[in-house]
Structure formats: structure tokens, C-alpha cells
Image: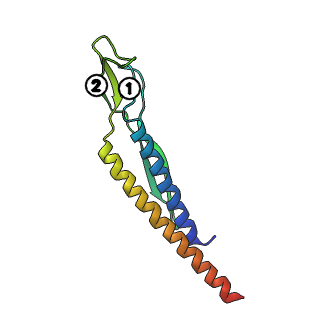
Amino acid sequence: MTPAAAIAQSGLAAATLKINVTASNIANANDTSAVGEPGYQTQDVADSAVPGGGVTAQAVTAKPATLIVYDPLSAVANTQGLVQAPEIDPIQEVGLLQTAGRAFAYSLKALRVANQEEQTLLDLKT
């Protein structure tokens, strides 16, 4: 694998993780738990540059913030009808999802170009 292809693959992996984490946050935005009990923790992706090119990414807990909301019909509601929900901004998550989708598309294009260049070099050798 060429260095350019390896860099593009690392970008694909990072973008895929960002898409999965964002989708999980969106899917769990309405999860509730009893007040004071652990519930869904909002996730984020921490990425860092790799020496020589590329990126590594890891899912991390974004913030342990929760909201106390009124939901008296919930099975986990307390006597006042309050439950705990993760603090997730769906609009921000959709924006992150779009950004990750673009990053995936750009990384895929870079991988295709790297593969085409490698194929051209192989064609020249034969």
C-alpha cells in the first residue's frame, strides 16, 4: 500500500467512526433514565495526526452532562415526574454528521486517486 493510500484509509476510518458516533448520539437523544442513575453518555471523536501522515480517531465520552426533564409517563420517572436525559443537540449532531460524510467522500476520492496512480505506475513497468 502506498503512503497516500494509507493516509486516505486512515481518513476513511476516522470519518466512519465519526458517522457511527454521531448516529449513536442522535439515536439515543431521547433515552431517559431515573434521576441520579447512569444513562446514555454523549460520545465524541478525538482525532490526532499521525507522524508521516494520516489520522487516528477514538470515541470518547464528550461530556457527562444530563438534563432533568419532565416526563411523567416514563417508567423511570420519579414521584415528581422527572427523568434524566442526555444533553444532545440534534442540530449540532446533524451538522457533525454532514461534516463526517464530506470527510468520508474526500478520503474515498483520495484513495481512488492513489490507487489510480499506483495502477498507472504498474502499467508503465509492463
Label drawn at residue 32 = 1
Q: Amino acid at mark 2?
A: Val
Which residue occupies 63% across, 80% down? 119
- The C terminus is located in which quarter? bottom right
Asked whether the beta carbons under mark 1 and mark 2 sit within 8 Å of each other, the answer is yes
* In the image: residue 1, left or right of residue 52: right
Which residue occupies 30% across, 46% down? 91
Q: Residue furthest front?
A: 73
How packed mark 2 is, by other alpha carbons closer than 10 Å (few <14, some 14-19, many 20 or more), is some
Question: Looking at the picture, does residue 47 appear above or below residue 81?
Answer: below
Which residue occupies 51% across, 66% down? 108
Q: In x, y percent, where is residue 57? A: 49, 52
Q: Amino acid at mark 1?
A: Thr
Q: Secondary structure at mark 2?
A: strand
* In the image: residue 113, left or right of residue 30: right
Query: Exactly how many numbered labels are in the figure?
Result: 2
